[in-house]
Image: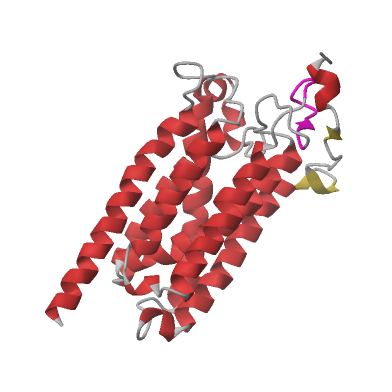
Amino acid sequence: MEPIASLLSILPFPEIDPVLISIGPLQIHWYGLAYVAGILLGWLYARRMVRNDTLWGGKAPITEVDLDDFLLWVAVGIVGGGRIGYILFYDLPSVIANPLRAFEIWNGGMSFHGGLIGTILAMLIFARKRSIPIWSLFDIVAAVVPIGLLFGRLANFINGELWGRLSSMPWAIVFPTGGPFARHPSQIYEAILEGILLLVVLAVLIYKRHALRTPGLVAGVFITGYGLARIFVEFFREPDAQIGYLAGGWLTMGMLLSLPMVGLGLWAILRASRASALLRGRL
């Protein structure tokens, strides 16, 4: 049998510099640009949805001005929560040893689960200040999050980080930091499932099924879909070296953090459906 190294070295890692532009000490990383692009494109998509009264069955409960003002809030929630979450869930010993590492978002990156918590807190506070129905705000944000996930996972691929386990698939890639063996490009798997697929599913629900008229439904489907997609991809993704497997040689931190999301998402879907049925019964 041929050595696994010779079988899996068909696709070399594309030589893409993680730094897009470097001007003296100033460096613009693809990773940071991905977050900016995801937030801005998500904002434009959200504005388009709130302008379409047909999607809401009347005037949208959120205005474009609200979305403009919320842009800074969500940026702080995503970046702050994502980085704090990564430190707490995945990299706390390293940050304690070197506190400056906490600011190196390109070194180890961000935690989606931490970013989700930060964004939820931002939404709760903002919705209360503006008297916006919280479930409708959840739905709008959930509908656009896959855009950010798509760009974020592509940036992970460019950085050559968060690669997958050893693989004999013809599309396996030898990552510069992953040793001499080819691995699953798990970042691409996540970009497809968490980004493209979820974006399409939610768009169909919104534009074909008018899901925004049932507050909480879009958010519930997103949370459930992300949790299932992440758990699935974790079977192909190499766990963080500093943590490894939590149990049984297969359970990872990503699975552990995603499992409650599935339950929470299913509850949100059920809650939205019951609330909608109750409202129809009163009409």
Q: Nearer the viewer, residue 52 or 221?
A: 221
Task: Say which of 273 and 159 sits in front.
Answer: 273
User: Could one spot residue 69 in this view of the protein?
Assistant: no
Residue at the (23%, 70%) spot, across then down:
276
Q: Is residue 20 shown left or right of residue 44? A: right
In which quarter of the view is residue 160 placed? top right
Q: Give percent across and percent down for residue 281.
A: 14, 76
Q: Is residue 173 magenta?
A: yes
Highlighted magenta segment, given as a residue range: 171-181
100 vs 169, left or right, is: left
**Which residue occupies the foreground of this view, 89 or 183?**
183
Q: Residue sitting at 84 percent across and 35 percent down? A: 11
| 86 falls in the magenta region | no
- In this view, 270 is above or below 283: above
Magenta stretch, overall SS: loop
Viewer can see residue 192: yes
